[in-house]
Image (spheres, rainbow, N blue to C red):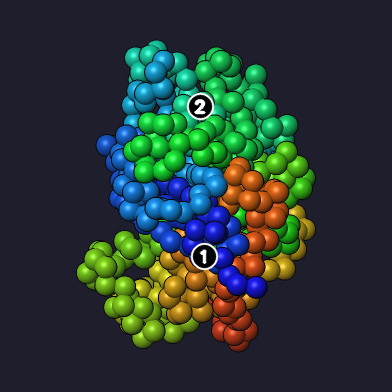
Amino acid sequence: MASKTRNELAYNLGIDLGTSSVKAVLAAEDGSETRAASAPCSVDHPLPGHAEADPAQWWDAVVGAVNSLDTAGMNIRGIGISVLYPALILFDEQMQPIRPAILYCDLRAVAESDELLKRYGQTGARALTGSAFPPGTSSVTSLMWLNRHEPEAVGRTARLGHANTFLVNKLTGEFTIDFSNASLSGLYDTAKNEWSKELCEIGDVAPDSLPQVLPGDAVAGRLSEGAAKQLGLPSGLPVAAGAGDVVCSALGIGVGEESELFVSCGSTNCFAALSTEPDFDNDLVNTSYLDRRTWINVGSTTASGAAIDWFVATYLEAGDYDRFFELCRASSPGAGGVVFLPYLAGERTPLYDPRAKAMFFGMTLSTTLADIARSVAEGVCFADRHIMETFERNGRKIERILAAGGGTRNELMRRIRTNVTGREIASSGLSDVSALGAALLGGIAGGCYADWRRAAAVARGAARFTPAKPDMAIHRSYERPYRIFKKLYPRVRDLFG
């Protein structure tokens, strides 16, 4: 049978809003072809611990990225969205953002987080929302902070939402949010998949100010004529509600079984596994997935690739990663006894401590720059192992680990991660898995796939994985430094200011 031509193939558009760029991907429905473009955006840090972004800049980047794609004559069936999450946005009556979005990595609301934890406790908080109200990562903490510090802005607020609320509104005029983003609002009963009246009262949120909650692959609306003109696309295309980037990444790499663990390696490393039960007593962040019977358990570091970026920019020359890995090779497993805690911006899983600090431990007069460099790479991988163990703490057996992202591109880094964890890890060459997952959501909304499981199967069939097996002798040599790694934080925790 002859292959279909470009005009005969159906394509779906995925829009991926990240911290530093917006990526737009056109993906053929059979997985045979993708093409991508991007446009920059940025995060602002107006005060230490604050992380904000301008939604207007996001939209400009979306327009730039989509217009950079060659869509002429293509049979586009649907549009899907992947977003960094959560990103709290206050809207006025005209759905215009009142102030910059407060991002997931914002740490200003530590006191509000502590207040909610004192009220509910770790167990109660997780049972209700799926997480333990981490600052920034649970939007209600940021909202409580705004009530206390920016009451004028809150007073002008008519509606609340996240990044995909904003993008769906710009694309279609509708007011929606998906399961995964709602789960990290801190206002949502994640097990029941509905807004929590109790939490809304605590956050002083009127129910009519909240978006309609939809599955991420549901049709949120149709592309408006105004948005279509800006993007160079036909109006009327179905637009999916979209989902958080972790959800889209898991879909884009083809995760479909509870025994599979996916890791996205980037500035932060994010681990995710599916679950068919809302059992949230697991020291993870838990959100709903793409239907009412599936949840996704998530564990994240705060600074993984970011720790390497910091070391390169501080001790070498910005961007000289070749030199960094040359230094790593010049040292040996165990980094000459140096152990690095990569808590440069606090830590998430499993510590959930925004006050945690990074440190080098074990340096002597014989320590070399190569040892210090390698300790950074190993410390990042020790944090990965700590998260993997958290996933298996309650009896879950991880049988397959799939990895993607920029942090998988370097062969030495892949080897260190595999040897530290003692696990075989299959890495995909795909760098845009969240954008691909967004395109798959668009494909479901556009009728290309019956449901997310069928879309995941297509993604899995198109993926190319390179497995890496651990050297168990080297893995055993890491046991002592890893024990030291896990003991360091509890020993010094009381010293963090």
Reading the image, the residue beneath label 1 is: 5
| Residue 297 shows in the view | no
Helix, strand or loop at disc 2? loop
**Nearest the eye: 71 or 310:** 71
User: Which residue: 39% across, 53% down?
Assistant: 72
**Nearest the eye: 182 or 21:** 21
Tell me: 71 left or right of 221: left
| Residue 191 shows in the view | yes
Q: What is the CA distance from the residue labelled 2 to the residue labelled 1?
A: 35 Å
Q: Where residue 481 appears, x then y in whole percent?
A: 52, 73
Tell me: 474 left or right of 331: right
**Nearest the eye: 344 or 83:** 83
Q: Amino acid at mark 1?
A: Thr
Dot in front, 2 or 1: 1
Helix, strand or loop at disc 1? loop
Marks 2,1: beta carbons within 8 A? no
User: Which residue: 64% across, 25% down?
Assistant: 195
Quadrant position of residue 128? top right
Counting residues from the N terminus, which is met first, the one under dot 2 or under dot 1?
Answer: 1
In the depicted structure, whether residue 203 falls above or below residue 111: above
Q: Where residue 32 appears, x then y in whole percent?
A: 55, 67
Reading the image, the residue beneath label 2 is: 174
